[in-house]
Image (cartoon, grey):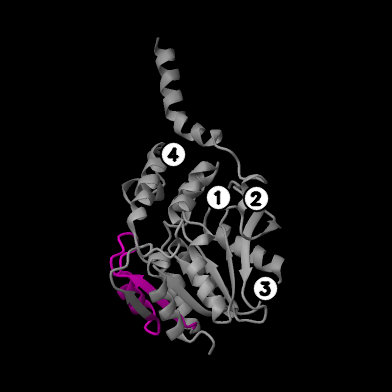
Amino acid sequence: MIWGLASVAALIALAPFARDRLRPTMGAEARQSAPGEFADLPRGRTHYRLAGPEDGPLVILIHGLTTPSFVWTPIADHLNGQGFRTLSYDHYGRGYSDRPGGAQDEEFFLSHLSELLDHLGLRGPATVMGYSMGGAIATAWTARHPDLVRDLILLASAGLGHDLGPVARLVANHNWVGRWLMHLTYARSFRASVEAERDIETSQIPNVVPLQLNELRYRGFIPAVTSSLHHMLDHDLTEAHRKIAEAGTPLLAIWAAEDEVIPVAGAERLAALNPSARNVIIPEAGHALAYTHSPAVTAALDAADLRR
C-alpha cells in the first residue's frame, strides 16, 4: 500500500517534466515558415536574419527571455531604412533555433553570439542592442569585449533589478519546487499574459500573439526559459556596468515608464554606476515597448546618432 502510494506520488511529481517530452521537436517541418537563414553551430542549428545594406554599420539585436527575434521586426526595418545592417537571431530554445541542453548562463549566451559572428565573418565593432534579458546579455558581452562594441543600447534591460513573479523568483533562487511549478503552470500563465496583448492597439507586429503562443508548441521552450531564469536572470550586472563605464563605451538605456517587469527605477541605478550613460524614459509604455512603442524607440535611436 505504501509503495503504491509512493509510486503514484512520484508519477504526479514527474508528470509536469514529462509533459514537455510529448511536444513535437523543432525540425525541418516547423522551419519551413522561418523568415531567415540557418547556421550550424557547435551546440546546434541557429536561426538568424541578416538584413540591410552590406556596407552599412552593423547593429546586433539580442532578444529576451521568451519572445524570439521577430520582436525586433519594426526596429530592424527602421534601422535598415536608415542604412544600417542588422543581425537578429533566436536564442537556443526559442523561435526556430535548436533546443540543446546545458545551463543557460552568461557563458552559454556569450559563446552562442561569438560562434554566430565567427560563422558569419562579422568581427568588427558593432552597435549591440539588447531587450529585456537580451539587455543583460548585451551588457555582459560589452563588458567582456569592449573592443567589439561601438555603442551599447539597452531596451528595458535586465541586470539591474526585475520582477518576473513568485514562481520565477523560486526558480531563480535555485529552488526545485520553483522549477516543478514552472513546468506545471508556466504554459497556462504564459498563454494568459500573451492573450492579454490582443487588445493592444499600438502593436507594430499585427500577429504578435499567435507568434508568441507558437513557442509553447515545441519541446524545449519551457526548459530553456526555466534554465535562463535559474542561471542568467539571477545575475546582477553591477560590476559589468562599472567596467563599461571605465571603458567609456557609449551607452543609451531606454526604459518603459509603466514597465511592471523591469522597473524604471533601474535608470537611477544605472546613472549612479555610469554617469555618462544616457537614459530615455518612454511615457505610457509597458515591457512590450519594442513593438507597442517602436516609433518612440526608433526616435531615441535616431537622436543617439549611431553613425557618428
Q: Which mark is residue 93?
A: 1
Residue drawn at the location 48% of the way across and 87% of the way down: 305
Q: Marks 2/4: CA distance?
A: 28 Å
The amino acid on which the numbered mark 3 sits, given as a three-letter code, is Leu
Q: Nearer the viewer, residue 258 or 6?
A: 258
The amino acid on which the numbered mark 1 sits, given as a three-letter code, is Gly
Q: Position of residue 279 (x, y in %)?
A: 36, 79
The amino acid on which the numbered mark 2 sits, given as a three-letter code, is Gln
Q: Marks 2/1: CA distance?
A: 17 Å
Q: Which mark is residue 32?
A: 2
Q: Which residue is mark 4?
A: 183
Residue drawn at the location 51% of the way across and 69% of the way down: 138
Q: Marks 1/3: CA distance?
A: 23 Å
Q: Nearer the viewer, residue 258 or 276?
A: 258
Mark 3 vs 4, N-terminal side: 3
What SS does tag 4 mark?
helix
Q: Which residue is mark 3?
A: 122
Q: Which residues are magenta?
A: 249-278
Q: Position of residue 238 (x, y in %)?
A: 40, 70
Q: Marks 3/4: CA distance?
A: 37 Å
Q: In the rendered image, is residue 171 in sight?
A: yes
Mark nearest the camera among 2 and 1 is 2
